[in-house]
Image (tube, helix red, strand yellow):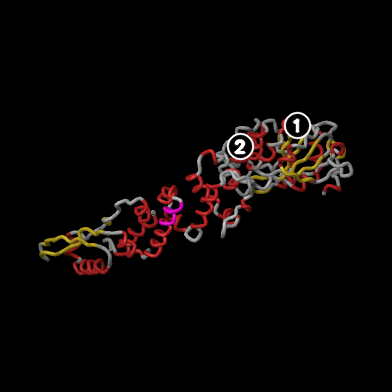
Amino acid sequence: MSWTTPDQLRAQVNRLWDQGQLLTSVVASEALFPKRLLLKRPTSSEIGERFDEVRRWIVELRRLENLRIEFREFRHPVLGNNAMPAEIWVDSVADALAIIGKERDFARFQTLLDLTRLRAPALMPWISAHPLQTLALADVWSRLLDIVQWIQAHPRADIYLRQIDIPGVHSKLIETHRSVLIALLDYVLPTEAIVSEASSVNQFARRYGFRDKPSRIRFRMLDPAHALLPELKSADVTLDADSFARLRPTVARVFITENEINFLALPFVNDAVAIFGAGYGFDALAQASWLSDCRIHYWGDIDTHGFAILHQLRSRFDHVESFLMDRSTLMEHESLWGAEPGQVAHDLSRLTESESTLYDDLRHNRLRQRLRLEQEHVGFGWIAEALTTVSPNAVVRVKANPSAA
């Protein structure tokens, strides 16, 4: 049937709910009703040719409660005068809710509105913009308001989230709902209480002045002369970022690698330290200003993400050099090529000319589809030779250090 059915009328009303209009109209006191629904009616010829179907169609419409049907007299040359549905209206929020069976959800939303008006009226615009999200949070909404009010009363508290003392609220609740709490807190807190550049969910603590667990940096001194402890020549050490920044070692070179075994197996190198990389995260390293005085060599996979990470690292230290991320290394290990799960496709402005050429070949799949050479597949002899090339006479012992593994 090409005419509007009762199910289609219900779907029109349901869209008002799914789009949040039913709930928003209550928050903003908007006059959404009475609302006319779209109605496709039989044509004059269809009435004459399919009169019995038209009559059944009218009966079905009449059975749908909570709708107001306006009829108009229609004169047919054969059938005479007939009353035909001309317009269908929903007259009120209550009627709309009854049609789609959302009365209970609506009542729950009204309770959330009353609670918010009482405790945090500044959040009403947010609720108006996100009514369905508010309703989805109904089970925890009161506790979210507790958190918002506590942070309002204790801006920039300089404590761990675990130390917030609110009955019924634990740090896991805050961690779970960080994204919505960011939205709510940004509505109610003054700008001076917010670190705007800390914009990601993972930077929640910093954004609102809480202490965060310290970033940790794992490293090995590749030169025994620079060992932190004399009896441990190549100790695998992990320090928080602040302590690492204060080290001030007198090394000349830094090797950053993304693979743990490569990190552990790097041979002794004069005046050098190895750092176990952190993918795309280099904020912790940026605190160590002494790195700016060192030659930094980054060793990642030869794939689009490897070059993207190199690009990002250069945003912190623009003098970083790539290590074993060249075409010669790639072609030497052709038998060990693999496939990159997902590729980076955007331009990377911080690559050198040769790096950019290889990156373009990778992202445009000119050598092979989704080509990737993982750094752990590079032969150790090739690594040792590259270390010698990077810094002649730098390698004290080419053989891997057994105590470091």
Badge 2 amino acid: Asp
In the displayed structure, 367 sits above or below 352; it is below
- Left or right: 224, with 285 as reference point: right
Measured Cα–Cα span from mark 2 to mark 1: 29 Å
Residue topped by disc 2:
360
Residue highlighted by disc 1 = 294
Name the residue nearer the viewer: 50 or 136: 136
Residue 156: quarter of image:
top right
In the image, taking residue 147 as reference, residue 376 lies left or right, namely right
- Secondary structure of the residue carrying tag 1 is loop
| Quadrant location of the N terminus in the rendered image | bottom left
Q: Residues within 10 Å of mark 2 (few under 14, many from 20)?
A: some
Question: Number of numbered discs present?
Answer: 2
Identified by mark 1, the residue type is Cys
Q: Would you say residue 10 sits in the magenta stretch?
A: no
| Residue with the most extreme right position | 231
Helix, strand, or loop for circle 2? Answer: helix
